[in-house]
Amino acid sequence: MCGIVGYIGSKNTTEILMDGLKELEYRGYDSTGIALLDNDKIEVYKALGKLKNLEQKISDANVGENHFLGIGHTRWATHGKPTELNAHPHLGEYSYVVHNGIIENYKEIKDKLIQDGHKFISQTDTEVIVHLFENYYNNSNDTKEAFQKTIADLKGAYSILLISKVQPDSIFFFKHGSPLIVAKGKEEKEVLFSSTDAPLIGLADDVVYLEDGMGGIASPAGIEFFSDEITWSTLPQSKQYAQKDGFRFFMEKEIYEQHDVITDSMLGRLQDDQIHFDEFDAKIIEGIDEIKICACGTSYHAALTASYLFERLSKIRCSVEIASEFRYKEPLMSKKTLFVVISQSGETADTLEALKMAKKAGLKSIVVCNVDNSSMTRLGDVTVLTRAGIEKGVASTKAFSTQTVVLWMMALYFAKFKNAISQDKLNSEIFALREVPKALIVCDKMHEKTRRLSKRYLHGHGFFFIGRDVFFPLALEGALKLKEISYLHAEGYPAGEMKHGPIALADPELFTIALMPQNLHYDKIKSNVEELSARDSTICSISPLDFELSDDFIKTNKTDHYMLEFFEMLVALQLLSMEISVRLGNDVDMPRNLAKSVTVE
Ligand code: AGP
């Protein structure tokens, strides 16, 4: 998944592009580049690695301030290793292109263009776009026709910005499968482009979230769209949300703001004695005998958590699928299944494809997502936004907690509709929901404890995170957080399963993080942990109760509901992984090999 930006206007183009790329760097940062067009002179600057390397190149080159049109790109490699040669923008003879997505038929296009005499210098799929455009233009002398024919030939997912010496005042743009926003700048004759809202904040008010198949040509004279059903929207957020607000990392900021954003997730939905979603009527569940949830990564863990709640509270069968498995297993699908996808970005390729399969099979679908106007939200029958605000840390935190709360509320919404829950029980669940913000408050004592613990857990042959019931998906989430940002091996496991093999690994070098809630199967989890302790595994228990056999512990608060223990333990797991990563000197916000949203297979 990459990030693209574009600018036409009278401000310092280089500055606008570079500031925009800074806002997008979390989407991928193998390499970056910009191309500036000044009348018929094109300048391009590219660098391997993070944006600061490109900044250095640009300052060394003393790039002037008088450019008024340019495009920029930050890359997460899909075709071709991360090298400067493969960095975007890609050049033809007189045009440049930046692209987010995958051109699936690039090989056949490339072979034909090579036969027509075009020379390629990169291994990327993207490069075919600019050569295809020039091939058409060389035969027609019509830029619009050449661009439209180029787009017509492409198969796959792409958002494209293309500039050319033959029309030096314009940016050609198109969106299909990957996100792209076009904006009217606050200044006269100013046009901006971006993959997401963040780079536009403060520079524009009116935007178009392009739909698949939308494109056009922008110039100081205005924006010519190829289609006429254009909907202008107002840019929703202010810049401050996307800044660190004094924290060391975006991840830390996002852990600390969970207690705050979770109230947004419940706003208008959690009423005095009932749950209500404006977005859809609970009768969507009429005639439904199963809920199938599909997701990836952390969102998959939220899905697993929700499966316990849908069965326990709504009394509806619930199955959970990993999207990358689901889409190729030739799944049997029934129209009596309600298909739910969960995604922070709304752009994860596997989850998006799974949603398309369900739609094609005629299933009703609900999209639980954090990014409005994303590809998934535009495809699902119903969208329920988690309202976590921009999440920039690659390791997802507030997305998970808001997803889990939304799904908990949804389970209660269906439970009430089906008369599967008494009003008393509903009231006690609602009471617990109201306590979630408190459970998510980061207390200094807990943060300080995780800082101290982090120094003990740097050298071992791995971690087991264990839990039962909803604390099993929480254990999976804790393990993923640690893996993602510390690069240490960790595994989430159902506590009751340890004796079916994994306990063979138990020794003092094996660290077990045991989630031991008081309100759910405490005695069961306690005996599982005793078995591990008896075999000398180093135990760190996270619990409101003292457990004398643990070598370390993180004390949580006593509460009346296991889901409140769930959220407090979540914070402990997030902090512990972050502090271990800090101690190892890793990049907490942009860990190696990862991108914020995986928009390719
Ligand atoms: C979470 O910390 C990871 N960065 C990753 O597993 C992520 O949850 C996964 O790629 C799914 O992304 P999505 O929620 O945007 O679909």
Image (cartoon, rainbow, N blue to C red):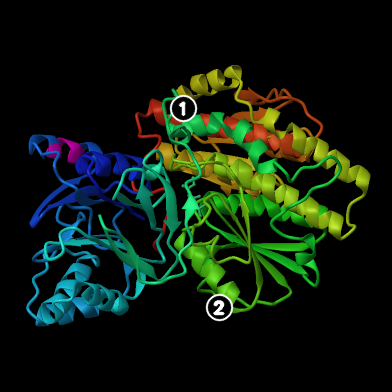
Viewer-nearest residue: 177 or 589: 177
Residue for badge 1? 579
Task: Name the side, left or right, on which 104 lies relative to 253.
Answer: left
**Which of the labelled discs sits on residue 52, or is there none?**
none
Q: Which residue is mark 2?
A: 330
Looking at the rendered structure, the kind of residue marked 1 is: Glu
Q: Residue at x 48, y 34 (%)?
A: 241
Question: Which of these two is toward me, 573 or 367?
Answer: 367
Q: Residues within 10 Å of mark 1 (few under 14, many from 20)?
A: many
Q: Quadrant of residue 326?
A: bottom right
Relative to 578, is 532 on the left or the right? right
Pick the residue in front: 487 or 305. Answer: 305
Q: Report the predominant secondary structure element of the magenta stretch.
A: helix
Magenta part of the protein: which range? Answer: 53-58
Residue 459 appears in the picture as rendered: no
Q: Secondary structure at mark 2?
A: loop
Q: Residue at x 40, y 28 (%)?
A: 582
| 173 up-or-down from 397: above or below | below
Q: Is residue 148 magenta?
A: no
Vertical arrangement, residue 215 with respect to residue 568, above or below:
below
Identify the amino acid type marked 2. Glu
Rendered location of residue 20, percent (x, y) = 31, 43
- Residue 375 visible within the image: yes
Callouts 2 and 1 close, C-beta under 8 Å: no
Total of numbered circles in the picture? Answer: 2
Classify the position of the N terminus by image quarter.
bottom left
First in sequence: mark 2 or mark 1? 2
- Give the residue drawn at x 30%, y 74%: 151
Figure check: 503 above or below 353: above
Image quadrant of residue 517?
A: top right
